Amino acid sequence: MSENHAMITAELVDLDLDRSADTKEAAARALAERMVALGRVTDLDGFLADVAAREAQMPTGLDGGIGIPHCRSAHVTEPTLAFGRSARGIDFGAPDGPADLVFLIAAPTGADDAHLTILSSLARQLMDADFTAALRAVTSAADAAGLVSGDLAVPTPDQSEAEPPEEDPPAQDSTPRFRIVAVTSCPTGIAHTYMAAEALESAAREAGVELTVETQGSAGFTRLDPETVERADAVIFAHDVPVRDKPRFAGKPTVDVGVKAGINRPAELIAEVREKAARGDLTAPRGPSPVDNAGDSGDSYATKLRVWLMSGVSYMVPFVAAGGLLIALGFAIGGWKIDKAPSVAEHFVWTDHTSWAALLFQTGGLAFAFLVPVLAGYIAYGMADRPGLVPGFVGGSVAVTIEAGFLGGLAAGLLAGAVVMGTQRLHVPAVLRGIMPVVVIPLISAAVVGFLMFLVVGKPIASLQSALTDWLEGLSGANAVILGVILGLMMCFDLGGPLNKVAYAFAVGGLTHPTDGSLKVMAAVMAAGMVPPLAMALATTVRGRLFTRTERENGKAAWFLGASFITEGAIPFAAADPLRVIPASMAGGAVTGALSMAFDCTLRAPHGGAFVVPLIGRPLLYLLAIAAGVCVSTAVVVLLKSARKTPVAPGQDAPDTTPDASRVPAAA
């Protein structure tokens, strides 16, 4: 590889990072500017936004004084590594304090495997104390680049200081070694994936354990040999993205943690999984839901509960969209009495538009009937993997039968997951472990959940659901406006995150047994959710100089995303400037939600945005409510950005305002 195209060169090294940086954002900018100077990065602000988005997923500080911010970005021309050293230390969120060694890894979206293999090699080197000690002692940028690239050998301790070899090797132990298979992965698959693998392998050697790791990173994905998995006594998952093909490991004692736990406490994980195997615990691995964070075992119960509920909602949404839109189309084509039409299986007429409307309506009704069972089933799936599906679906069906509705589905899913998780902890003979996930656990848990839902918790929840329906039906005047404000604030606070999903799920739940009140709630929720992306699109159009070039490009796409009711279209703006964008979005969302309720607008479709306007009650007033909210949000964000301390000269881009990544709101 030529010097001009080396992964790291002396120009990409800053041994006195304190001169230009005292925060992680400033450090990333200082190192990224060196990449820009060499033509490795084409858009500084766009690249730094990608770095901040990666940092928001999980801090990149590691024990031992290391910070390793990294991302894959379309603004990177070739895989590049920059290194900085800070005497004071920079906080990257590591448990043991600031980092004095900072590596910024930039990989293009289509990076080749050879380059990414080099990056993974660096990640493993960072677990070597001699390597990090050499970097702390190096005095020239060229030598630092040589150490990192491997062109310069890492100094090793004087051989005389090493312990002499033992005269008599220890006798070989005839006891079979304990076997572990592990999977490591992180969101970008560049650094933490391989650091966790190296840490686990080192800890296994010290513990006398046979451990084989499957690194599911960007530099290739080599699946573990099925025979190796079969012979393994236990499994360790250290991951922050869903493990691929997780059912391979079913039926073995498992420890499931975040990737940083694999880096920071590998010996504890090995001891924990050995203890589980000794007890005979059958801990089936959790399934990979779309919102699976695979968090550390130290996560709070509230965090785990949010993940479980979002799992159910994420799987439910496609049924909501398909079923709800089919029902709405049936009403639009056949009129409001289409729900009284006879079954199309016996009375379909090819030339009658009413028959086609009835076909759409009845098909949508069948799809919509899955809403509560799917919600319950996949909440249980998020908690307990595949064994949770059967009791979850059964509990959700019971909730529909006893008219416990959406609330009953939530309760059924949580009950099913809890029952399965409790059953999995039972000590069972080895001969029964193979049939536990597919026979014994579903049988016992379905019976228990059915009993609880029919005879214990189902009826009280059904009564609560009925009371909630009556309350919505009776809303009018100031009460309706207040509810509209609350729903608007929730939809715009985290732009597709937990609060947004709670408000949306509340509205969709009312469509299972639609009333005038629940249709008003659905209208207010969708209207408010359209405001943030539309407002950012309008703001970048009328006052483009307040935004970066990247934000102006995102603003063009935000027009369509907002019109389609995709609130997440505003996330790039919120990630770069949350203290201005989020309050502005909430202000407009509150106005729109309040006006929609005040105007008595209704909506039978759970999605679609501007494309389902013909299905909206009082459509002109509905569009007026959306327009008012968009104007309010646009005015507020323009005002806040105009008042920033650093003025923007005509014709220039706005300065980067990316705050601490920990403040960036989570998106679904």
Image (cartoon, rainbow, N blue to C red):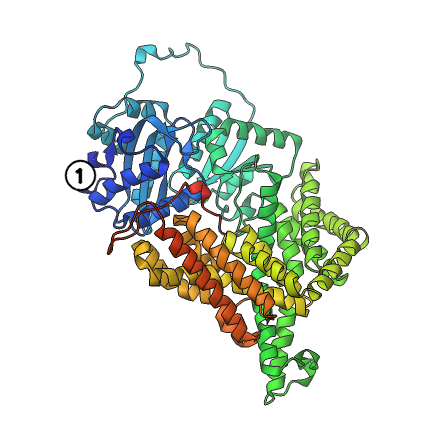
Count of numbered circles in the view: 1
Residue name at image x 34 percent, y 63 percent: 541
What is the quadrant of the N terminus in the image? top left
Looking at the image, can residue 151 be seen?
no
In the rendered image, the vertical position of residue 234 relative to residue 443, given as above or below? above
The residue most toward the right is: 455
Q: Secondary structure at mark 1?
A: helix
In the rendered image, the vertical position of residue 326 relative to residue 533, given as above or below? below
Task: Return the x and y of residue 5 as percentages of the image width and height.
Answer: 20, 43
Circle 1 residue? 3
Task: Return the x and y of residue 198 as percentages of the image width and height.
Answer: 42, 32
Looking at the image, can residue 411 be seen?
yes
Task: Return the x and y of residue 19 as percentages of the image width and height.
Answer: 26, 30
Task: Return the x and y of residue 132 as percentages of the image width and height.
Answer: 33, 25
The residue most toward the bottom is: 351
Residue name at image x 21 percent, y 29 percent: 141
The amino acid type, in three-letter code, at marker 1 is: Glu
As drawn, is 96 to the left or to the right of 360? left
Q: Residues within 10 Å of mark 1 (few under 14, many from 20)?
A: few
